Amino acid sequence: MILILDFGSQTSQLIARRIRDMGVYAEIIAGDSPLNTSILAGVEGIVLSGSPESVYDNGPMPDPSLYTCGLPLLGICYGLQCMTFNKGGTVKPLPQREYGAIRLHIHTEIDERSSAFLAGFDKTIPLEAIKTGTARSKAAAITITVWMSHGDTITELAPGFLEAGTSANGFPALVVHEKEPWFGVQFHPEVTHCERGAEILAAFVFGLCDCRQSWDMEHYAEHIQQSLIEKVGTNPVLLLISGGVDSTVAGALLLKSLPPEQVHLMYLDTGLMRKDETDHVTAKLSKLGAQHLTVVHSEDEFLSALAGVEDPEEKRKIIGDLFITVQERETARLGLPESYFLAQGTLYTDLIESGKGVGTKAHLIKSHHNVRTPLVAAKRAAGQLVEPLNRLYKDEVRRLGRVLGVDEETLNRHPFPGPGLAVRILGAVTKEKCALLQEVDAIFIAELKERKLYDKIWQAFAVLLPIRSVGVAGDLRHYGSVVALRAITSADGMTADVYPFDLKDLLEIATRITNTVKAVGRVTYDISSKPPATIEWE
Ligand code: XMP
């Protein structure tokens, strides 16, 4: 395993991702964590990440035992500056930051150790050869285009370090220690637009740390199942299910790791879910072996709390608060012993707030109302919270789900917002409007699946507008509802583009909606990207 010390860079998680993709497990910890023997168990090498901070301005520092643990080190950007600063060199602000693609020239006396790392830079050596751990480069001069983003630079190397590569602007970009297995790069090999980036990381992981490709999702599934069993013992575990990918995979993990009678699942039907969602969730979880699934029918409670409320923020707040109340009441009603554990399907990305890493600040982040309830806080404080997916990205969760036998339909479902249809019914929410929107949405989604478009779209749904418009039905005037369809492409929901439907598809879908749901008189398509719009309408 490779350990990554996260000093707060936005790309720390990418480093871990790249290494895991090569078949080696990588774990991220806060950059200033104590490096005791239990943390270092099984670690073959350590990467020091970048950071928006400065070493000379109270930036985070690693535990000094980093330099006596004997493991190979790779400092990336701030990580290299940190090593330089800790070992007696000087780091200063640049007059102008180096940003983006920059040429790097390597000029070094080659010894056996650095030749294993330099194989990563040598364009004649393929990635597969580097992964065997035996690739060596004897090239005397190499030039590649790397990707940089730094405002500080090394102005004086620490004693024992050599400058093996220099940026086109004349700053140290590759640094090698004479005796210790310590290497540093001023650029970011983890970003995709860095030439030879994957090869450089592979040269460290396989050539210097001697790792072998032995990590895959099957192994990881075994690993988290084992740690889950060790953590919860024979105590009952409760998981709130939303019907989405994360909580379903977390549920499958619990059910596959523990005796099913130990696993308690709870699903709150707020009445604001997709059509037939409760049946869908119940069926999927029974298939995964759930024995204790409690469906809480709180539709009336949510709808009466929302009655007449038009303001979007107020609707969100009412739902969030009521969610907590119902959750606490129903959990108490289950009568579980004090010792029960609470499980959550929190992902790595949920813990990150724009690059804050996995340190102490990281837990405060996800805005979803499930994550920060008083119950979660109490269970966390009591050491009875388990978040088995919190080292994984969404696509890794899908892969884990596959290993655990979760069906493809569930794994590829579009995201659905916590407040549900309440943010898709503009203005006041009623039971009738929910029913109408569920019908329209179900037709839209079924059409996308039939037309093989569903998997090309990141998220699609229907919105009920707070207006009516005039039309004709037969020979009669029809004063009907207006719905908007939304379909977007996105990488992570932070930005989004409108899905460019073929007009024929849109026309046919709209016709089917107005033919099937008589109350709808008009269908529109939302052609706004994010920004300036958001994905949801409220
Ligand atoms: P926006 O509308 O902010 O949505 O562009 C971005 C993504 O987040 C989802 N979303 C939510 N998810 N709780 C959630 O769990 C919420 O309160 C919430 N609001 C929006 C939205 O569906 C989209 O995928």
Image (cartoon, rainbow, N blue to C red):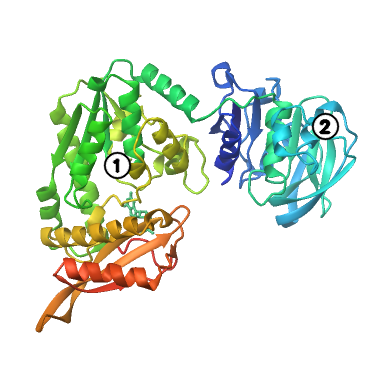
Up/down of 414 relative to 525, above or below: above
Q: Which element is circle 2 on?
A: helix
Instruction: Say the numbered circle drawn on residue 204.
Output: none
Q: Which element is circle 1 on?
A: loop
Q: Nearer the viewer, residue 220 or 492?
A: 220
Q: To which residue does mark 2 refer?
A: 115
Up/down of 196 relative to 488, above or below: above
Q: Nearer the viewer, residue 365 or 507?
A: 507
Q: How many marks?
A: 2
Instruction: Say the numbered circle drawn on residue 370.
Output: 1
Q: Taking the image as drawn, is residue 276 in sight?
A: yes
Up/down of 197 relative to 289, above or below: below
Q: Amino acid at mark 1?
A: Asn
Q: Is residue 151 left or right of residue 220?
A: right
Q: Amino acid at mark 2?
A: Ser
Q: Residue at x 15, y 57 (%)?
A: 306
Label 1 crowd bin: few (<14), some (14–19), many (20+), radius 10 Å: many
Q: Is residue 2 left or right of residue 224?
A: right
Q: For residue 164, what is the image quadrant? A: top right
Q: Nearer the viewer, residue 365 or 473?
A: 473
Q: Residue at x 41, y 44 (%)?
A: 365
Q: Is residue 264 left or right of residue 160?
A: left
Task: Looking at the image, tell me whether mark 2 or mark 1 is earlier in sequence order.
Answer: 2
Q: Position of residue 221 (x, y in %)?
A: 44, 26
In the rendered image, the quadrant that contains the C terminus is bottom left
Label 2 crowd bin: few (<14), some (14–19), many (20+), radius 10 Å: many
Q: Taking the image as drawn, is residue 158 in sight?
A: no
